[in-house]
Amino acid sequence: MRSYALKPALQALEFDGALLARGFWLYVWEITAGDGGTVHYVGRTGDSSSSNAQSPFARLSQHLGKNQNSNALRRNLEKAKVVPEECQKFRLFACGPIFPESKSRDEHMRSRDSVAALEKALADAMRAAGYDMMNEVRSRKTPDRQLWQVVVGTFGARFPKLQNLPSPCDS
């Protein structure tokens, strides 16, 4: 009889159907590494290279895949010397869609820029609150005050240290 190096184990993936909706979303990955340490990654859907805005579910598989053009989470983990396949837990928290997928290029760019400003503000706020962040987000735009309140309120339910920080809309 042939022996196998791996021991099969039953794994589970559970998610809400809403994660399949296309549009402009913000998300936070919370990853528990093999050594028990926790790291975070902030991202968004709605990229600059096309007029599409995917679902968080589509980004989930791309982030952890082998395609160097779309696996930013895997690259950040490996840079931090964290082996994705040895992680204890991956949790994805997504807020959206903040805007629907756009019909025109101009509308896409406005939505993309608005969500990019929120993405940067969220990553910066998480870092300032003491969460261990793997990525640095760049945007020169100022986040919309109303949208920021929604974002910080939504993510603040899971990451409570975000709730008492100054607003990035005042800078």
Image (cartoon, rainbow, N blue to C red):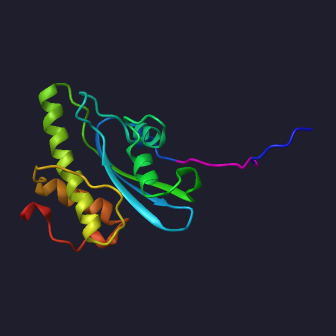
Given residues 28 and 107, the one toward you in this image is 28
Looking at the rendering, which quadrant does residue 30 occupy?
A: bottom left
- Residue 13 is one of the magenta-drawn residues: yes
Q: Residue at x 41, y 41 (%)?
A: 71
Q: Residue furthest left?
A: 171
- Residue 32 is one of the magenta-drawn residues: no
Given residues 149 and 86, the one toward you in this image is 86
Q: Quadrant of the C terminus?
A: bottom left
Q: Residue at x 42, y 53 (%)?
A: 79
Q: Residue at x 29, y 34 (%)?
A: 53
Would residue 156 appear left or right of 117 to someone viewing this image?
right
Look at the magenta stretch and give its main secondary structure. Answer: loop
Place of residue 114 in the rendered image (x, y in percent of width and height, measured from the top left): 15, 45
User: Which stretch did the figure color magenta?
Assistant: 7-14
Place of residue 123 in the rendered image (x, y in percent of width and height, measured from the top left): 27, 58
Q: Quadrant of the N terminus?
A: top right
Q: Using the image, determine if residue 105 lies above or below residue 69.
A: above
Place of residue 76 in the rendered image (x, y in percent of width and height, measured from the top left): 40, 51
Given residues 18 and 29, the one toward you in this image is 29
Q: Residue furthest top?
A: 104
Would residue 171 appear left or right of 94 to someone viewing this image?
left
Would residue 77 appear left or right of 22 to someone viewing this image?
right
Place of residue 147 in the rendered image (x, y in percent of width and height, measured from the top left): 17, 53
Q: Residue at x 65, y 49 (%)?
A: 11
Number of marks in the image? 0
